[in-house]
Image (tube, rainbow, N blue to C red):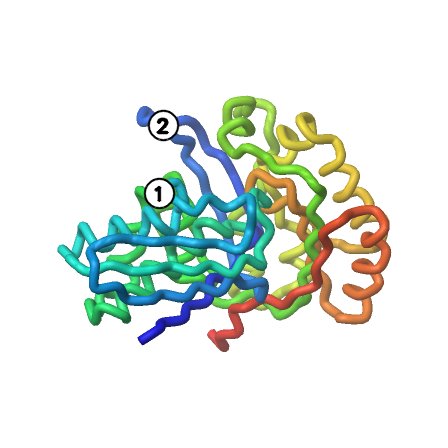
Amino acid sequence: MIHFERAPAKINLSLDVLGKRDDGFHEVEMIMTAIDLVDRIELYPLAENRIEISADNQYVPNNERNLAYKAALAFKSCYQINKGVRIKIEKNIPVSAGLGGGSSDAAAVLRGLNRMWSINAPLSELANLGKDIGSDVPFCVYSTTALATGHGECIYELPSPPPCYVVLAKPNIGVSTRGVFQKLCIDEISHPNTNEIIQAIETKDFVKLVLNIGNALESVTFRLHPEVKQIKEKMIQAGVNGVLMSGSGPTIVGLVEHFSKARRVYNGLRGFCEEVYVVRLLDQRKS
């Protein structure tokens, strides 16, 4: 029986870097939420004890370097599964975009195998399993709205944000997260106010949210890739009050309350940037 799983993209509402840890990772504090831009994962059980993987995107590896492959391998090892799986990935999330596409695919595989092989592990257990696969995988296991600390592995779920539309604009470049962190100087970055953002989410205050969102990595990525900064400036010029870079970039995110305005911003950016999307927040919980 084929099992299907959705793998939503994530956006940052904040990203702060607090310092460098003894293990070489940076201590971060991030607020993330899932959006309705989704990869589709198909899982086919195999009698043979092996993992096969294929993605419909030339930039996604079809071998053990794929995070979804690593997730399947980790799951089989953890739960001592001696059966196999064929994983098919239909990519809709841009690659190397700061939107967590690879991490979300891996998280979807963990959730899907959990159902397919009737392990019934709680999400917290799957998130813990995912932390060694990629720093965004624990969040993507939940794919709601959450504060992530440590190097991304400690997840604290938050209420759903105020409803809005999300405009995404990605230039035709990829950004190396490792490269950005290597160029990071803690003393030179500006820090978003994480507590204010959490309060805005808890009170569903859109105005307060857009006034406080921010990403400490922007200055580094903007220096390395000036075209990313230009897209942010274009979005601000178009009248979007809440604009920030997602992850280490290069995708710029704009939060807009009304669809008519989101559409105008989308049309204004289309001639300037190749990949532009208007999506909704996926987290529609009432709490």
Please give the residue where the numbered disc 2 appears in the rendered image: 21
Residue 197 is at least partly visible in this image: no
User: Circle 1 sits on which residue?
Assistant: 64
Q: Is 204 located above or below residue 93 in the figure?
A: below
Which image quadrant for residue 4? bottom left
Q: Nearer the viewer, mark 2 or mark 1?
A: 1
- Decide which of tag 2 and tag 1 comes sooner along the chain: 2
Local packing at callout 2 (Cα closer than 10 Å; few below 14, some 14-19, many 20+) is: few
x, y percent for residue 265: 81, 58
**Which residue type carries mark 1?**
Glu
What kind of residue is marked 2? Arg
Residue drawn 33% across the image and 67% down it: 44
Q: Tell me if 84 is positioned left or right of 207 in this view.
A: left
| x 65%, y 58%: residue | 208
Count of number-bearing discs: 2
Q: Quadrant of the N terminus?
A: bottom left
Residue 106: image location, x then y, percent? 39, 53
How far apart in space, not on screen, are marks 2 and 1 (Cα)? Answer: 28 Å
Query: Where does residue 186 sit, x and y in percent of width and height?
Result: 52, 25
Tell me, for residue 270, which label it has, or none: none
